[in-house]
Amino acid sequence: MKALCRWMLVLCGLSCLGSLAWGGEAKSEFAPTLEREGRVLVRNGSGVRTKLVFDVYAMALYLPQRAETAEAVLSSPPPRVIAIRLLRHLDGRTFAEALWEGLEKNHAPDVLATFRAPLARLRAAMEASGEMKAGTAVEITENLHGETSILVDGQALMEPVREPGFFPVLLAIWLGPSPVQESLKTALLGRKE
């Protein structure tokens, strides 16, 4: 029995190491800069969302200029881009529920009420998307007019959200006072990569 327990610990350790290695490779996939609407955006930071011992997605944040605090990022001018690459198969409904939980933890009900219609559209579109495979690229972009578009593997997930302020509402999932993962928030702020 002791031997079995030891083997299980070794296997768990190996899976953790493999998970960390894959996460490191995924982070390096994000370009140091992007161009949107004739503007060069710099990668402010990137990191990997983990749950238990599994890497779920890699993520990078692009801004017109670097910012080191959540407040500075959330108030920075557009264009801005959140780039996400899934590292595991993920059901659209599960992804939507995780995002919704992050929204509720970081915003008062009146703020969410302001964006009730676009949030409902986003949730419905994500749930309808079905399973997203490992390697799927999700890009959330705020253009110079403050409109937010969401692309999945280059295809629009839904009509752009025209209400200004929607992008920072989403960004607070990762950079708000109760982020989905504190180490990912730190990485997106460029404090460690």
Image: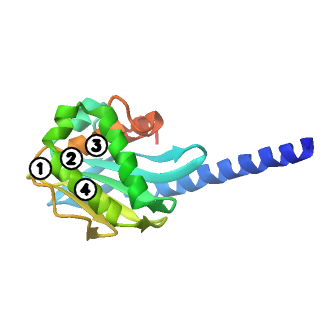
Asked if the residue at tag 1 contacts the one at tag 4, i.e. Cβ–Cβ closer than 8 Å, the answer is no
Closest to the observer: 71 or 34?
Answer: 71
Q: Could you say whether the residue bearing mark 4 is in a helix, strand or loop?
A: helix
- Whether residue 57 sits left or right of residue 158 in the image: it is right
Mark toward the start of the polypeptide (4 vs 1) = 4
Residues at discs 2 and 1 in contact (Cβ within 8 Å) = yes
Which residue type carries mark 3?
Leu
Q: Mark 1 points at which residue?
A: 146
Q: Which of marks 3 and 1 is nearer the N terminus?
A: 1
Where does the image place residue 180, in percent across and percent down from the top left?
41, 39
Q: In the rendered structure, are the residues bearing label 3 and label 2 in contact, judged by CB atoms less than 8 Å apart?
A: yes
Q: How far apart are marks 2 and 1 (CA)?
A: 8 Å
Residue at x 47%, y 60% (from the top left corner): 90
Circle 2 is placed at which residue position?
A: 167
Q: Which residue is drawn at 36% across and 41% down?
A: 101
Residue picked out by circle 3: 171
Badge 2 local density, few (<14 within 10 Å), some, or many (20+)?
Answer: many
Which residue does the numbered mark 4 point to in the structure image?
Answer: 122
Residue 124 vs residue 60: left or right?
left
Q: How far apart are marks 3 and 1 (CA)?
A: 14 Å
Q: Can residue 146 be seen from the camera position used here? A: yes
Camera-nearest label, 4 or 1: 4
**Amino acid type of disc 2?**
Phe
Picture coordinates of residue 54, whole percent (x, y): 58, 50
Cβ–Cβ under 8 Å for marks 3 and 4: no
Which label lies toward us, 3 or 4?
Answer: 4
Q: Is mark 1 on a helix, strand or loop?
A: loop
Residue 176: image quadrant is: top left
How far apart marks 4 and 1 lie (CA) works out to: 17 Å
Q: How far apart are marks 2 and 4 (CA)?
A: 12 Å
User: Disc 3 versus disc 4: distance between alpha carbons?
Assistant: 14 Å
